[in-house]
Image (tube, coloured by chain):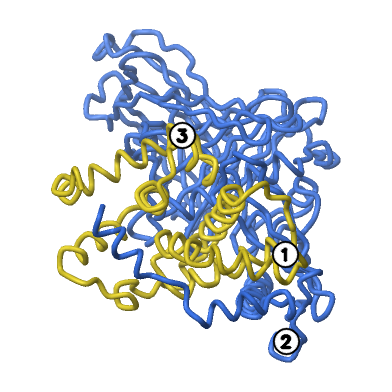
Amino acid sequence: MKKYREYMDNVRASDTLHQRLLGLETSGTRPVTWKKYGTMAAALVLVVGLGAWGLGKSGGWDALAANFRPAATTVPEIADEPVPDIALVAPGDVTEPGEKTIGGYEVVSGSGENAMVSYYVLPYIEYGPPSDISAAASLVPPAGGIREATRDDVLALVGKEDALTAHLDWGGRELRGTVGFEADGTVWMLSLWGEGQDTAFSLELSPGRLPPTCCVVIGEQRTITNVWGVEVSGVNCRGAAYGDTERGVYMDVCREVEFIANGVGCRMKAYGTQDGAVEELVSRFVRWAVLEGLELSGIGPDNGICGYPLAPSGETGDSVPDMSEPPILRVLCAEGLVDGRSGNYHWNYPGEDGQTVGAIACGLHPLDFREAPSLTTADDAVTLDFGRRPDRVSAVCWPDSQWGNTSAASQAAEVGHVMGHVRDGYALRLEEGGWIYEISAEWDDYGTASYVFYLIKN
Amino acid sequence: MNHSNRLEELVTKHEHTLFRAALAILGDAQEAEDAVQDTFLRYLEKRPELRDSDHEKAWLLKVTANRCKSILRMRKRHPAVELLDVYPAPDTDCRELMEAILALPANQRSAVHLHYYEGYTSEEIGAILGQRPGTVRSHLSRARDTLRRYLSGEEGE
C-alpha cells in the first residue's frame, strides 16, 4: 500500500477549508449544511403533502386519508431566513461508544431563528449471508374478526404524525393493511403493507409475542443483533422478490427482521433494489419500535365488527375480473404460481338486458382430473387469489395414492383468512406429500365454483 | 488555553488527517470538506474531555466516520465527484490502485484507510467505526482479496 500512502500524503485540506474551520467558533454557523438539509426538509414536507394514502376502495379509508395529509405544509424560505445559531442545533440520539450504526438522519423542526436540527442515529442490523425464506401466510383465529386498517390505527400505533413522515419514511407511501382481533376484541395481529417508489415493506405486529405466521424457511440463517438492549433477528432474504416486472416494480433486495420491543412483537420485511435503502427503512422502524415504542392497545375492533368473520365481499385487487363466469383461481407460493379454471360450477350473473343468466357446468371428478394444475412447494400454506374475494371458501383433499379411485373418501383441508398484503385474503394449509385439493368458493351474488389442484409439499 | 486557541490547535493538528479519512470513505472532496466541518461543529457543540492527542484524534475520526456514513445514506441526491479528477494520481499504477480502492464498499475503504494509512489496529478501528474487531478484520480481509494484485507486489515494502 505504499502507493496509497504516497497518494494520501499529497492530499491535504485546502486553505479554504482551513479558514472555514477556524471561522466556525466566531460565526457559530453551518451555512452549507443547513441550507442543504433545510432544502431537503422542505422537499420532504412537500412530498408528504403530496403523498397519497390509499387503503383500498372501501371502509372509509379514502376520507380518512384525506384528513391524514398535513393540514398546512410550512416550507421555510431558506434563502431569506437567518442562518440558525449552532446553539439551536439540538442533538438527537447519542451513539454510545462502541455502538454500531449505519449513520442517521436529521429532522428539521421549526423555522427561521427557532429552527432546530435533530440528528437520530440508525442502528446497524446484521443480516448474515443470503438465505432462502418462504412467503408467509397468517391465519386469523377462527373466533376472531378482521377489518381493514385505518389511518387512526396507524396513528394509534406510532403515536404521532411526524413519526410517519420524518422518522419512519412512510409518508409518501401507499399504505394498506388489515387488523385481526381475538374474540374478546383485543388485537391479534396488525398487518400493514407500504409501497413507495423505491422501496416497499410488509409489517406484522402482535401484542406480547412474535406475529404467528406459518412461515416455512429453507436454509434460513438468522443473525442476532443487539439493538439498544433488544435482540433483533435479521435475515438477508434471497429470492423473496416483491412485485412483478410487468408493473415495473420488481424489487429483488429483501431484508427481514423479527423482534419483540416494548411488549409488541414485530416482523418487518422490506424490499427494494438497493441494499442501503432497504436496510435504512428497516433500521428506521427498528429505532422507532425500540426507542419510542409501538402501541396496539389503542386499536379497537369497531362496534359490531368484532366476530364478523370476513371483510365485506368486493374488489380488493388492482383489476375487477369478469364475473360472467367463475374467476380464475391463482394459487401462489414462494416457488411460483399456477392458475386454475373451474370445471364445476353453478353460476348466475346479470345479462345485458338486466335479466339474470344462469350457467351450470359439471367437470371431472377431482381424482380423475390428472391434468389438474400442479405445483410443488416447501411452504406450509399457499395463498388463494380469486381476483374477487368469495364470501365463503372450503376445501377437501385426497392423497395422490388415490388417483383414479373416485370412491375414495376425502378429508377436510384447512382454509383460513390471510392477514397481510395478499390481495385476496385466503390461504390453504398444505399436508405433507402430494395431495389433490378441491377448493370450493361461494359468492353470494353469483353462485359457487370448485377448482382442482395437485399440490405437493416436500 | 481559551476555546479559540484550542479550536485552532485542533484544526491545525487534525484537519488533514480528518480530510483524508473522509475523502477515503466518501471519494468526494466537497462532501469530505462538509464532513470535516461538521466534525468540528460537533466538537464545539460537545466540547468533550479528551485525554491526550491520541484520544482526540480517535474521537475526531469517529465523528468524521459517522458523518461520512450519514452523507453516504443521502448520496442518492448528491452524486459524488470523481476523486481522481480532483487529486490526480501520479502514475498509472497508482491510479489503478486508487480506482480499485474507491470501488470497494465504504466499510472496507474505511478499514483500509485507517489500517494502512493511519496504522490503527483492528481493535482501534473497531472503536472508531463502532464495529467489532472481527468485523473490521473481515472488511480488511475482503479488501485484501480484492486488492490482492496490488498488495502482492508490494509485500515487504
In the rendered image, residues at marks 2 and 3 fall on the same chain: no
Which amino acid, by three-letter code, is at mark 2? Glu
Which chain, by letter, is yellow? B
Q: What residue lies at 53% left-to-right and 39% top-to-bottom?
A: A125
Residue pointed to by mark 3: B133
Question: Which residue is identified by label 2?
Answer: A77
Quadrant of res A22 = bottom right
Q: Residue at x 56, y 51 (%)?
A: B62
Q: Quadrant of residue B137?
A: top left
Q: In the figure, what tint was chain A given?
A: blue
Which residue has dot 1 on it?
A: B44
Amino acid found under the numbered disc labelled 3:
Pro
Res B48 visible: yes
Q: Secondary structure at mark 2?
A: loop
Q: Nearer the viewer, mark 2 or mark 1?
A: 1
Q: CA distance from mark 2 to mark 1?
A: 27 Å
Quarter in which the C terminus of chain A is drawn:
top left
Q: Earlier along the polypeptide chain: callout 3 or callout 1?
A: 1
Q: B87 above or below B68?
A: below
Q: How many marks?
A: 3
